[in-house]
Amino acid sequence: MTSQDWLTSEPIAHRGLFDNKEIAENTIGAFELAIARGHPIEFDVRLTKDGKLAVFHDMSLLHMAGLDKAVEAASWDEIRQLTLLGTNQTIPTLRSVLEAVNGRVPILLEIKKENLKPGMEAEVAKSLDNYNGPFAVQSFNPFSVLWFKRYRPAFRRGQLAGDFGGQPGMKPVANFLLRKMYFNYISRPHFVAYDIQAGDYGFFERMKKRLDIPLILWTIDTASKRELCWKLGVNYIFEKPGRG
């Protein structure tokens, strides 16, 4: 990997640049548009039923692709035929995204994993082992972050966090531990990416002082949120509708 200064200095395009009308999120088209503007790219990866790494955010394929099925319950042969939100764009594999980006801009790969099943992290690591370009990995799942600490310590790894108390299925104890990032003591992330909606200036200023690693905020979609990041002196993951 090359220098990781981009993680703290270059605003990162959330799922590429897209409008979910002409250009769908997490597609080669969205990534190409971000690359053309020189933005690092954040994107999501999920494991399919047959062990393929699909670049896709949602647990279910229903909203984006019209198939009422979870990604992890679908085979790649099913997924590869789907188009997104009425466009002709399809869901790419991690390998195809890495080949398309080819080190032209840095990438921030989010591992989407809501369970403790083994295997996904190793597959992601294999894809990145010979990738010639700057990258980092991140996840809400602290055990995914811990996996990279143990087995790929040279990879830059980040802990995603926020306040998810209102989400279905989120138990208060689990939300408390994740919101406070107590798992950081074992997974030792290199940076924290935190939901900007979970706090205000004072909250994040205190967090910056408490953390001994960089803080990145997400998702920045208004001028006021961007100005808060500037005031705090932190990098951010942004979403810019349309063609930027």
Image (tube, grey):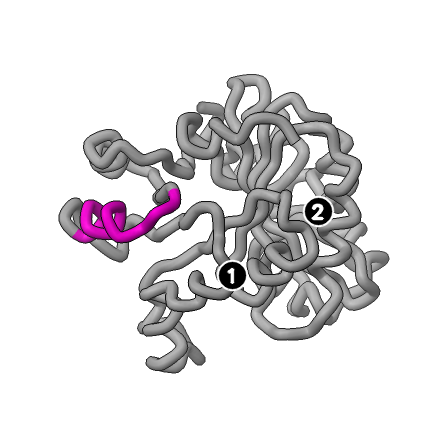
Local crowd size for mark 2, using a 10 Å CA cut-off: few (<14), some (14–19), many (≥20): many
Residue 138 shown in magenta:
no
Q: Is residue 53 left or right of residue 29?
A: right
Is 137 situated above or below 12?
A: below
Q: Looking at numbered disc 2 in the image, what kind of residue is underneath it? A: Ile
Q: Is residue 201 left or right of residue 162?
A: left
User: For the magenta stretch, what is the residue range?
Assistant: 203-213
Local secondary structure at mark 2: loop
Between residue 37 and residue 231, name the one nearer to us: 231
Residue 163 visible in image: yes
Q: Residue furthest left?
A: 202
Q: Give coordinates of residue 65: x percent, y percent.
A: 65, 54
Between residue 201 and residue 41, name the one nearer to us: 201
Residue labelled with disc 1: 187
Is 174 situated above or below 239?
A: below
Residue 46 picture quarter: bottom right
Residue labelled with disc 2: 91
Q: Earlier in the sequence, mark 2 or mark 1?
A: 2
Between residue 202 and residue 77, name the one nearer to us: 202
Query: In the rendered image, which quarter contains the C terminus?
Result: top left
Q: Dominant secondary structure of the magenta stretch? A: helix
Residue 212 shown in magenta:
yes
Query: Which residue occupies 69% across, 56% down?
Result: 151
Q: Evaluate if marks 2 and 1 touch, with contact meaning CB atoms under 8 Å apart.
A: no
Query: Which residue occupies 22% across, 36% down?
Result: 232
Query: Which residue occupies 79% across, 36% down?
Result: 130
Q: Which mark is residue 58?
A: none
Local secondary structure at mark 1: helix
Local crowd size for mark 1, using a 10 Å CA cut-off: few (<14), some (14–19), many (≥20): many
Query: Which residue occupies 66% across, 31% down?
Result: 1
